[in-house]
Amino acid sequence: MKERRSQYLSIRGLRYHCNEWGSPDAPLVMLLHGWMDVGASFQFVIDACGGNFRFVAPDWRGFGESAWCDLDTYWFPDYFADLEALLDHYSPALPAALVGHSMGGNVASMFAGIRPTRIARLVNVEGFGMHGATPDQAPIRYARWLDELKTPQRFRDYASFEELAARLRTDNPRLTMERASFLAPHWGYSRSDGRVALRSDPTHKRVNANLYRLEEAMACWQAITAPVLWVTGRETETLKRIGLDDAAMAARKRSFRQLTEVEIPAAGHMIHHDQPALLVAAIEDFFRAGPLPFKGL
């Protein structure tokens, strides 16, 4: 495996952990993980990559080794502000490439429209957005949020890292035992009682009080000026889970000015775990397809 370094930053008052690979002088590619994941899980992608880049994969607030919020709710716009602070630190003068998976893809795609001059290339891996909500759903959503605030949230713990690795493979049968064993100590940690707990704030389990406003997301996507690579896994069940049919997907894709689509075979939602080499090949082809404002491949 390629050497991974850790750096800890103060980002908007929180201690942020960032995983880094490659030369600090190389062009920046920021890797943004999804919900209940960690930055270190991009290790398989890094190992398959032959390009000359500096890769930075932060642990989002409340995940991995980054600090938990001293709040009862995680607000989605905070990810935009955290990402901007990270870019201010790592690439204050030059636009960067973003590769986001799932929730990270949603953050990256909206941010690329909010700050279009800061992004050179955008790769959205299974980050399609949620099913659009309607205003009439607000009373029920707010009531549910208020109810959940009264209930402590918990994740289950595990007897060992081996048990956690087995659970990861249950959730994703395509995950090899070797990769699951690598991921387990990054997803979990040993408590003083010997049990293994997840490196995730249980507060993430609470429903967000705000409805998902698809029109706002699409307005951000329409403002993106960078080329976009839209990556899906051929065996993904994400679209079915969030209730998106072909027409809904087509409408979302039309929101992007410069869109390239790639489907990765033998891969589900966790493409960076299932087929990292094929994902890297698609990204490298995408980066080579046009001029970049920085030298890389």
Image (tube, rainbow, N blue to C red):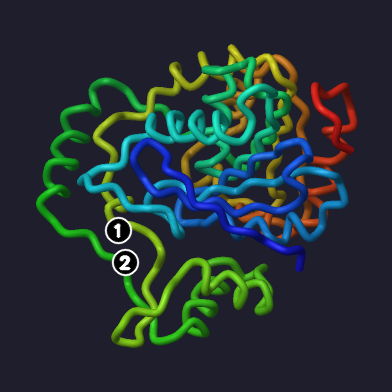
Residue 294 in sight in this render: yes
Q: Which type of secondary structure does the marked residue at label 1 adopt? A: helix
Callout 1 crowding tier (Cα within 10 Å): few <14, some 14–19, many ≥20: some
Residue sitting nearer the eye, 156 or 17? 17
Q: Is 117 placed left or right of 263 in the picture?
A: left
Where is residue 140? Give x, y as percent: 18, 34
Alpha carbon separation for disc pair 2 and 1: 6 Å
Q: Is 274 placed left or right of 34 in the picture?
A: right
On residue 155, the disc is 2
Q: Is residue 12 above or below residue 213?
A: below
Residue 128 in sight in this render: no
Where is residue 252? Give x, y as percent: 59, 23
Q: Which type of secondary structure does the marked residue at label 2 adopt? A: loop
Quarter of the figure that contains the N terminus: bottom right
Q: Is 113 placed left or right of 164 in the picture?
A: right
Q: Is residue 93 above or below residue 60?
A: above
Q: Are marks 2 and 1 in contact (CB under 8 Å)?
A: yes
Quarter of the figure that contains the C terminus: top right
User: Mark 1 = which residue?
Assistant: 202
Q: Which amino acid type is shown beneath numbered disc 2?
A: Phe
Q: Is 130 placed left or right of 143 in the picture?
A: right
